[in-house]
Image: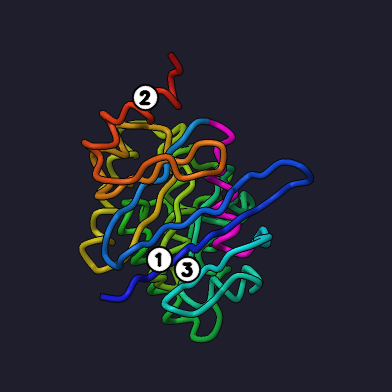
Amino acid sequence: MAPILEVAGVTKRFGGVIAVNRLSLTLEPGRVYGLIGPNGSGKTTLFNCITGIDRCDAGAIRFKRRRIEGLAPHQIFHLGLGRTFQVIRVFPELTAIENLLVVTDGDYGRAQARAEEMLRFVKLESLAGEFAGNLSYGQQKLLEFVRVLMTDPELILLDEPAAGVNRTLLNDLLDAVRGLRDRGKTIFLVEHDMKVVMDLCETVFVLDHGEMLAEGPPAAIQSDERVIEAYFGR
């Protein structure tokens, strides 16, 4: 099966700082991948390069074999690649369901049905008419998550989905991610909660100072001496 995403030799600089350095990785369809590393290791920068928010200084990014580096974020989104952000970006003065409808166009009836389906997917259907600003932090994270799903993307990037979410809502989110994988979607997540990473991901990539330090199944990553040193030092 052809890879859904290929990152080949990507470099991103900010002035004299190399945030991502000649990084390469491949994602296969229908799997859950994790991206971990110490603070400042380049994780969110890599996500920004993949989704067009930051322009690469070198290298190539292919989504479904099409080169996408240089495309605008909205163009990449409409190709079937969606993401969430570390900082929640809901519209607080719109209702939960209106927050989902803002990313759609065309058939209103179909969009309304899809929005209702997505709210049921994360057990927020009873809050459809509630202003997003009145939802709890965890509920807002779930809302942002399903907003990404409104256009049925094939690849979903999640930036720290577990941060600040209580265990009950987190379990709902993790169940939703597993459900997406079972439907053939590909998930790529940045996460600091190692329990989430180890329980959910099939392959884990580890960054350190913008470079690939290790990659492999969770058990191998957890016991890798280089990873332990990068996180905890000696």
Residue 139 within the segment the image draws in magenta: no
Rounded to the nearest whole Å, what is the CA distance between mark 2 and mark 1? 29 Å
Judging by the rendered image, the residue that carries numbered circle 3 is 81
Location of residue 80 in the rendering, given as x and y in whole percent from the top left corner: 46, 74
| Residue furthest to the bottom | 107
Nearest to viewer (mark 3 / mark 2) = 2
Q: Secondary structure at mark 2?
A: helix
Quadrant in the rendering for residue 187: bottom left
Rounded to the nearest whole Å, what is the CA distance between mark 3 and mark 2? 32 Å
Question: Is 153 rendered above or below residue 160?
Answer: below
The structure residue drawn at horizontal position 41% and vertical position 23%, both measured from the top left corner, is 229
How many residues crowd mark 3 within 10 Å: few (<14), some (14–19), many (20+)? many
Q: Secondary structure at mark 1?
A: strand
The disc, 2 or 1, on the residue closer to the chain's N-terminal end is 1
Foreground pick, 150 / 129: 150
Foreground pick, 83 / 149: 83
Judging by the rendered image, the residue that carries numbered circle 1 is 155
Instruction: Say what amino acid the circle numbered 1 marks.
Output: Leu
Instruction: Say what amino acid the circle numbered 3 marks.
Output: Leu
Magenta stretch? 39-52
Rounded to the nearest whole Å, what is the CA distance between mark 1 and mark 3? 5 Å
Question: Is 70 rendered above or below residue 109?
Answer: above
Location of residue 150 in the rendering, given as x and y in whole percent from the top left corner: 44, 69
Location of residue 69 in the rendering, given as x and y in whole percent from the top left corner: 60, 70
The structure residue drawn at horizontal position 48% and vertical position 64%, both measured from the top left corner, is 82
Judging by the rendered image, the residue that carries numbered circle 2 is 228
Quadrant in the rendering for residue 5: bottom left
